[in-house]
Image (cartoon, rainbow, N blue to C red):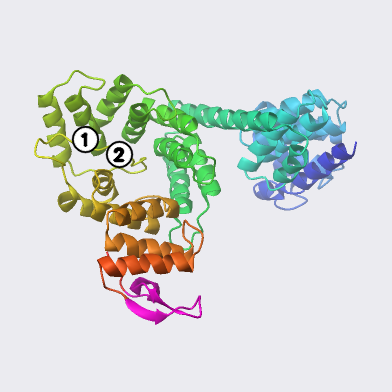
Amino acid sequence: MKNIIKMTCLVLLFLTGPTVYGASCYKKPHDVANCKRKASQGLSRAQNILGFAYTKGRGVPQDFQKAAHWYRKSALQGFALGQVNLGWLYMTGKGVEQNYTDAAKWYEKAALQGDSNAALQLGLLNQDGYGVPLDLTLATMWFSIASEQGSTTAPKYQAIIANKMSSKALEDARVFTRQWLRDFVITAFSSATQNNCNAQNCTHDAHLWFVMGQQYSHAQSSWKQNYKRALQSFQRAARKGNIKALVSIGSIYDQGLGVAQNYQEAALWYKHAAEQGSANGQFNLGHMYARGEGVIQNYNEAAHWYRQAAEQGETSAQYQLSKLYNEGQGVEKNALLAQQWLSRAENSQTAIENSRGDFSRVQISKQGRWNLYNKTCSSGFTACQLTAEQGDAWAQNKLGLFYKEGKDVVQNYKEAVKWFKKSADQGSGRGFYNLSTMYLNGYGVPKDINQSEKLLAAAKKNWGRYKLEKSKNTQTSIMVPVSIKSQPRLK
């Protein structure tokens, strides 16, 4: 009973909010006549507002039966707020006979449209077994969905019931949540691309959400990096038909940015993008098949998706396809085709956006390791990644800077540390230097002044462009990288 009271209070808080929706027909408390005209014309939004007026008794006598009448008309047209408000009437028994099962039905319809409050209410119903089976796993799923859709209240309820659940039940809830959200986004994406969402305003909205996701991912300008909001923005963009957003969602799961790293989930998102013709999605999916990450390793599938991307001019796919032909993996060994795809890759001026960028070594030349750094690393992240994977210490250090600064790739201090370390392991003074700055500032590693000093000593031994200064973090004099004092970075 206490939980039902909480549910009622939550929804009442929600019902006090929609006054902004009355801007067109409920701008003033006495302007109900305009709402009635629009509602009678079949406008679902106006019908919901009129139902709200009868619920609150604003401009008309309070009448829950009439409120139910107009909410139902709005709900039957698929208007999410109308569905939520009708669900509330069934839950409280106001204007209709109390029926928790019907309440759950309307909440679920609204949740399928992305309404976080509806998902929250479904979680509460499952938590207590009202109108639906008592199921803490499903309750956790709905609370997680509500949280993903922006609810700030859902995590509190989720934390309460988590203590009552086994680790398996919690993992099941996480799996159900990912599956529900994925199906939700893909269904909306398909509807957007197949029906009427190619209009200019819809395409514009999708692009804005995608750009917002990029801003949250890269922490550009005044935006604070927030991977959860980035994921939410990419999901909104995908629901409106933005194919790049599908790849970006996959990348978030692939790299474990703000979520638990999950190659299987990433592969599913890449597959959706690939099947829609995304070159980046095709390349990433091919790469996962080549490496056996999230899918069973299958060079035939890798070759198929690499070829799809390569034929669209995707440089990295052309490199990888040339390697497969050279080594006879997934395709019949063919030195001529290997050289042709390699030549196309060398001549291409395009570069990957939103890709995994985790490339294998390409060794086709009989003259030894193929070092592209002098020709291509300066052109951007993709070529630099390829060369770093080949073992070039200079490129490995440069790649670390790409990750550290968030240039052409999502900022990732742990990846930066990894590449600085690879460079330093080969005796690169620049690698030692940049790794020392990471320990000095606690970027991607625990802050450790002593370790920073050791790395700087190694850097000085291999490359002496440093100066002694008094550290602000310790009482002793240590070697401080020039860049820490706002000097030009040594690259």
Would residue 105 be found to the left or right of residue 221 on screen? right
Total label count? Answer: 2
Amino acid type for the residue under numbered disc 2: Phe
| Numbered disc 1: secondary structure | helix
Query: Is residue 311 at least partly visible in the picture?
Result: no
User: Between 158 and 216, which is closer to the camera in this rendering?
Assistant: 158
Residues at marks 2 and 1 touching, judged by CB atoms closer than 8 Å: yes
Identify residue for label 1: 319
Q: Is residue 475 above or below residue 61?
A: below
Q: Residues within 10 Å of mark 2 (few under 14, many from 20)?
A: many
In the image, is residue 270 above or below residue 467? above
Residue at 44% x, 52% y is: 414
Pointer 1 local density, CA inside 10 Å: few below 14, some 14–19, many at least 20: many
Residue furthest top as drawn: 332
Q: Which residue is mark 2?
A: 359
Quadrant location, the C terminus: bottom left
> Where is residue 420, by image quadrant?
bottom left
Please provide percent x and percent y for residue 176: 62, 28
Q: Give the magenta-colored segment's residue range.
A: 467-487
Toward the right, the furthest residue is 1
In the rendered view, does 224 fall on the left or right side of 299? Answer: right
Which mark is first along the chain, 1 or 2?
Answer: 1
Q: Residue at x 40, y 55 (%)?
A: 417
Residue at left 83%, top 27%? 130
Who is closer to the viewer here, 243 or 72? Answer: 243
Q: Which of the image's four quarters has the N terminus? A: top right
The residue lying toward the viewer, choosing from 220 and 85, is 220
Q: Please provide percent x and percent y for residue 103.
A: 78, 28
- Secondary element at image label 2: loop
